[in-house]
Amino acid sequence: MFKKFLSPIAAFLLLAFNASAQHRTCAAEEVLAQQLLDNPAMLQEIQRIEEHTRQFAQSGGAIDRAVITIPVVFHVVYYNSTQNLSDAKLISQLDVLNADFRRTNADKGNTPAAFQGIAADCEINFCIATQDPNGAATNGIQRRQTTVNGFGTNDNVKYYSSGGLDIWDRNKYLNIWVCNLSGGLLGYAQFPGGPAATDGVVCDYAYFGTIGATPPFDKGRTATHEVGHWLNCYHIWGDDGSACTGSDGSSDTPNQADENYGCPSFPQISCSNGPNGDMFMNYMDYTDDACMNVFSAGQKTRMQSLFSSGGARIALASSPGCQEPSGCGTPSGLTATNITQTSATCNWNAVGGATTYTFEWKKNSDLNYTVVPNLTATTHNLNGLTTGTLYDYRVKAICNGQESSYGSAQFTTASNCADQYETNNTNSTAKSVPINTAFTAQIASTTDKDYYLFGNTSSQKNIKVELTTLPFDYDLKLYKGTSLKKTSQNGGTADELIILNNATVGTDYKAYVYGYNGAWSNTQCYTFKASRSSSAWRTDGSTDGAVEEISLDVVFENVGFGLFPNPAMEQLTVEVPLEAEGNVSVTIIDPSGKMALTQQNTLTKGENQFTFDVSSLPNGVYFVQVRNGEIAKTRKLIVQR
């Protein structure tokens, strides 16, 4: 029997992220754990699904089942143009899903011979939706520009009211949200049995599809992994913290000690599973995209049970989401080209049977569209536009008097930010900039680099350098003369921040701004600011309160709190940093979801500690939840003697 229902991911939301050295991170298990903590009654539904899966397998499983086709809708939620993936990139991801779940993937021959016998065609297809929940024509892609530059696992991306896009009926569609995920997180999914309003998959835009995605997660396997969770497959190592006691619920996947990273050599032996070792090439491990290539027959059984009589996702088997609605097709492939400061060309794909098109456009901030009717071409030029402004445009087709639904898209005209400090491409040509003053500049080509010169004083020794409003992945370094002092290399368009307290006085400091891996834009600017202060800067960039340099022998795997020792034997310390005084509760939860130990106190600003006697707890996996008002963080704890 499948014993695991809760397992948050360790090392979730890393404090620093470098795409070239990143390990795969998935928060599906942590999201499940949080949902069960928030709604304990959900555990009964999870158990019902597991029992249904067991009975399905016992009765013959996935043998001779009809192929299931699942309609897909992509919800693209973007902060800037880099995050607004093209239709082609989205469709490339759909192609990967179809290849991986039907075992037509080009790299299937890389599956070791020892596992070829259980490699499965899961008999699940995916199609882009052609009919929306109201029965109108659609291209299966929704887009929204948001003011949120970085979503977490709280499902805000799934609600229009919190900056995202609302779900389409989960009984008719697989909903996939594509956005900028914070903290180096690649994606997460909701397992069957969860809330209807949040059911689906979330993926970071940088690791989606196969066109221009970021290595080593550039072959679309992040979505394959997350859709696997959505289809009730768990991490192959059982999330047991290397204890060799966990299970992923599939009897044919070898028991393994922990997740595998990178691209291991076969065999990779753990938990006495020789001679063949771990199935690290399974899509539900944590290896790089190029090393994933297989689902097992047992995992296929778990997936297919969802579509059998009484299965949790059986309604999808009869969804009309990929049936062409009657009437006129919706224009697709909307793109804007030749964008300047005052003009743009809007294009779209031809619709079969269309005699004319109606084109409409407006500033994003305006209420009303300007209407251009009776177009026979599939392109339209716009002129007289405003510099650096977001525009909405949409197109509908007219077929023998019938009107289609609108296809819609956006573009932003080129900005007018002059780079006043060029040329400053080298340390020796750094340009002097004003202190405590923000200004905009550009990385205008693949070879462009910006060096800025400033100093501190004996009364204001403490330095802070900020890089914000990044159009692409730009990074920051701080030099004292030619000696490198600090580096900030956050992923994507996340802000960069360097703090140097008690800096040496009487020497030049130089900030170096550059595009990671040649990133650049000659139309969009970043914002730079160098500041100095008499008070030491805090890590959040403020000077609020005293700063004490401390050194703790603790690895903070979660931004929320520290936990040590882990594994614990007799005593556990939970360390909780707070920005202000507040009421905090700490609860230790056993694998069945029951509270084992709890404490609650009013804590002061700064570092606080809770101490638990865990000597009475049986060995095993537990979950520690720290809650401060509406904010809760959860981490996995191992008790082992």
Image (tube, rainbow, N blue to C red):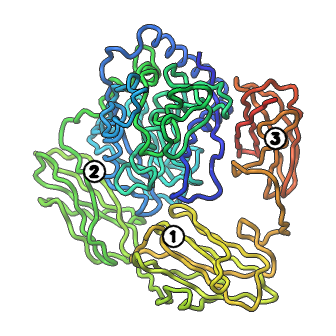
The span from disc 2 to disc 3 (Cα, nearest Å) is 50 Å
Find residue 378 and name its label. none
Q: Is residue 195 visible?
A: no
How far from the left and from the top, in percent, is residue 67? Answer: 30, 23
- The residue shown at (49%, 49%) is 160
- Whether residues under marks 1 and 2 lie with C-beta atoms below 8 angstroms apart, the answer is no
- The residue shown at (66%, 31%) is 240
- Residue 118 appears in which quarter of the rendering? top left
- Whether residues under marks 3 and 1 lie with C-beta atoms below 8 angstroms apart, the answer is no
* Position above or below: 238 against 357: above
Q: Is residue 323 visible?
A: yes
Q: Earlier in the sequence, mark 1 or mark 2?
A: 2
- The residue shown at (58%, 66%) is 489
Return the residue at label 3: 585
- The residue shown at (29%, 43%) is 138
- Callout 1 secondary element: strand
How far from the left and from the top, in percent, is residue 374? Answer: 14, 59
Find residue 406 and name its label. 2
Give the left or right position of residue 394, taking residue 570 as reference. left
Q: Earlier in the sequence, mark 3 or mark 1?
A: 1
Q: Residues within 10 Å of mark 3 (few under 14, many from 20)?
A: some
- Say what amino acid the circle numbered 2 marks: Tyr
Q: Indicate the quadrant containing the C terminus: top left, top right, bottom left or bottom right.
A: top right
- Say what amino acid the circle numbered 1 marks: Tyr
Q: Residues within 10 Å of mark 2 (few under 14, many from 20)?
A: many
- Callout 2 secondary element: loop
Find residue 474 and name its label. 1
Q: Residues within 10 Å of mark 1 (few under 14, many from 20)?
A: many
Give the left or right position of residue 593, taking residue 584 as reference. left
Identify which residue, 335 or 502, lies in the foreground.
502
The span from disc 3 to disc 1 (Cα, nearest Å) is 39 Å
